[in-house]
Image (tube, rainbow, N blue to C red):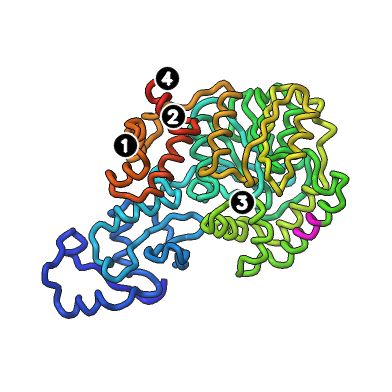
Amino acid sequence: MGAPGPRLSPALANGNVRSKPDARRVKRRRSPPPRGGFGRRTVLHHARQGGIPLRIARVPCFPREHRSLLCVLDPISFSAIILIDKPPCRYRTDVPAQAQNARMSWGICPERGHMRPVRFTKSHDGISLAWTRTGSGPPLVKAANWLTHLEYDAESPLWSHWVDFLEGHFDYLRSDERGCGLSDRDTGTLGIDSWTDDLSRVVEAADLPKPFILLGMSQGTMAAINYAARHPEDVSHLVILGGYARGSFCRNDDKAARLYQAIIDVMEAGWDQPGEAFREVFTHRFVPDGDPVRVRWFNELCRKATDGATASRLLTARGQSDVSALLPEITMPTLVLHADGDVVVPVDEGRFLAKHIPGAELTVLESQNHIIQADEPAWPAFQRLLLQFTGQTARPADANLTDREAAILAEICAAKSNKAIARDLGVSEKTIRNHATHIFAKLGVATRQEAILKVKGG
């Protein structure tokens, strides 16, 4: 962690501020913050005081726009201790509160400071597959998709809202695909039959009640379609988001095929490089509207979740797969959702699915992102459509909201502006906007007016 930094005295750690600091402490206070962060005792003290999970693997620099904070951070798990970095503020005694606010602004909710239980099962060719089952409600299975890591998804700024919503409304089963995350890095036999068998074995290992809702995202859609065609009695509803039935090499589009092959070549050559330039060729297409924090996190996740050779084999196998012949065999109710600006999977592929699956419903969402993010209008729209399609309703506000979220919701119901709420609570207006996004997501609404009507029973 670098050279030890300054440590708080016991008096300061207990909240007793010295009125007349001695010369030695004054000199320390004026010295610049240590490059490697605070001392270990200080870190541990504020971790305990703030209730922040400890996962100290490195001390990367905070983005320049957040240079007023110093974060002791694992860039994958985002478990963090966030401390004030400006010299005049280093000895403040409200660091835990500051850290809590900063964690929330990074999308790290206090309730998510623990690891979900992860279990393993074997594939037909001996590959170890990692899976986890959380939440309560109607059973829902998400077919494994690129790019996840069960250990970190629940705390990440990219996937955490997905985990919170799905396990908040469903008995939620998810897994890491072969070659990625906590599953074995050995890919074994790749192809639609292997992916579908992996899905089947995870479902059986979890002993999930049947029939269940099956969610296919991106390339996970192909395994979901194949499973639904083979086992129609097991699936009550099929939901497809940003999915496709034809790989990039099977769409009769030479230009798209050349681009896909170029991405594979770049990934194989530069995926494992320490810099982000090569991986960003791939990741920026998934969240083009993502802020630097999300893009940086996704770049780091790619390096942690798999290696370049495995990524190349996975993408090649996907590009060569085609389950379009199975689409007429889908008999259960099917909802197809697709972002209109998706550059990873063009919206025409979503239309192709809806056209060839009997009775499928198609809704095009307003988004540029392949992975829909919590702070865009498409997210509450997706939640509302999924709940309506599966016959569910949003959980009551008091069942899911934190104390801070409940307080902010009360202020919203009092018709106060974000600026007024921020002033009353002593936080920034951006923090209130972030809280409001999470509140709307939990309520399954898109606007303030809808939230007020839901709370008041309108």
Residues rendered magenta in the picture: 259-263
Sequence-earlier tag: 2 or 3: 3
Q: Is residue 213 visible?
A: yes
Spatial CA distance of label 4 from label 3 is 36 Å
Q: Disc 2 marks which residue?
A: 449
Mark closer to the chain start, 4 or 1: 1
Which residue is under mark 1? 407
Q: Quadrant of the C terminus?
A: top left
Q: Is residue 216 above or below residue 154?
A: above
Determine contact: label 1, label 2, CB under 8 Å: no
Most foreground residue, 230 or 267? 267
Q: Residue at x 71, y 48 (%)?
A: 344
Q: Pointer 2: residues within 10 angstroms few (<14), some, or many (20+)?
A: few
**Element type at marker 1?**
helix
Q: Tell me the kind of residue under disc 2.
A: Gln
The residue that disc 3 covers is: 287
Q: Residue 54: x and y, percent?
A: 39, 57
- Residue 298: image location, x then y, percent: 58, 55
Which of labels 4 and 2 is toward the front?
Answer: 2
Badge 3: few (under 14), some or many (20 or more) residues near its Cα, within 10 Å? many
- Label 1 crowd bin: few (<14), some (14–19), many (20+), radius 10 Å: some
Q: Quadrant of the N terminus?
A: bottom left
Please name the amino acid that badge 1 sits on.
Ala
Give residue 458's mark: 4
On whether residue 357 falls in the magenta region, the answer is no
Q: Are marks 4 and 3 in contact (CB under 8 Å)?
A: no
**In the image, is 113 to the left or to the right of 387?**
left
Q: Residue at the location (74% across, 22% down)?
A: 359
CB under 8 Å between callouts 4 and 1?
Answer: no
Q: Quadrant of residue 175?
A: top right
Amino acid carrying mark 3 in the image: Val
Q: SS for tag 2?
A: helix
